[in-house]
Image (cartoon, helix red, strand yellow):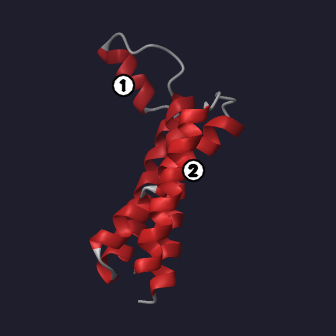
């Protein structure tokens, strides 16, 4: 498989994982103090959609991994850290400090180096 397609599939997988994290966060409306709370949470539509997103992500990741090296695919999948930070800032209105921005930039540089070496 073409390395650009592998990178694309891995980035899409990371996006699905990142949006799944958002759905998980939204699905956790209250504290989980009992087994009943946990069961109700597992039936929450956001949690179920998040799990479906994970399934799509996992499938795309496996396709990319099947045709490329783990040492290439896994670091590119780390872009989910970047996507989650952006999603958290834009949709959840979380404050992103200077150190976290620096960390995201370093992750981006690392992913770029790995992708260019593929």
Kindly state the secondary structure of the residue where label 1 is placed: helix
Q: Is residue 73 left or right of residue 25?
A: left
Q: Which mark is nearer the camera, 2 or 1?
A: 2
- Name the spot of residue 117 as percent of width and height, x first: 41, 79
Residue 39, numbered circle: 1
The quarter of the picture where the N terminus appears is bottom left
Query: In which quadrant of the rendered view does residue 26 lie?
Result: top right
Which residue carries the number 2 mark? 83
Q: Position of residue 10 (x, y in %)?
A: 46, 68
Q: Work out whether residue 89 or residue 58 is closer to the camera in this orientation and state it.
A: 89
Q: Residues within 10 Å of mark 2 (few under 14, many from 20)?
A: some
| Quarter of the view holding residue 57 | bottom left
Q: Front-most of 112 and 57?
A: 112
Residue 45, placed above or below residue 6? above
Q: Is residue 97 left or right of residue 38?
A: right
The residue at 29%/70% (across/down) is 71
The picture places residue 74, in percent across and down from the top left corner, at 35, 63
Q: Which numbered disc, 2 or 1, marks the residue that appears first in the sequence?
A: 1
Q: Say what secondary structure mark 2 lies in.
A: helix
Question: Quick check: 76 above or below 63?
Answer: above
Residue 1, visible in the rendered structure: yes
Q: Is residue 69 above or below residue 77?
A: below
Can residue 19 be seen here? The reply is no
Residue 58: x and y, percent?
38, 61
The front one of 56 and 1 is 1
Residue at the limit of the structure toward the bottom, as seen here: 1
Number of numbered tags placed on the structure image: 2
């Amino acid at each position: 498989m073409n390395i650009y397609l592998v990178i694309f599939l891995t980035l899409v997988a990371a996006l699905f994982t990142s949006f799944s994290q958002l759905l998980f966060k939204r699905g956790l409306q209250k504290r989980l103090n009992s087994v009943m709370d946990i069961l109700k949470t597992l039936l929450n539509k956001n949690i179920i959609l998040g799990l479906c997103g994970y399934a799509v992500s996992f499938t795309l990741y496996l396709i990319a991994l099947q045709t490329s090296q783990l040492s290439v695919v896994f670091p590119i999948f780390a872009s989910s850290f970047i996507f989650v930070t952006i999603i958290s800032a834009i949709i959840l209105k979380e404050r992103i400090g200077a150190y976290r921005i620096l960390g995201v930039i370093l992750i981006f540089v690392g992913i770029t180096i790995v992708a260019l070496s593929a």
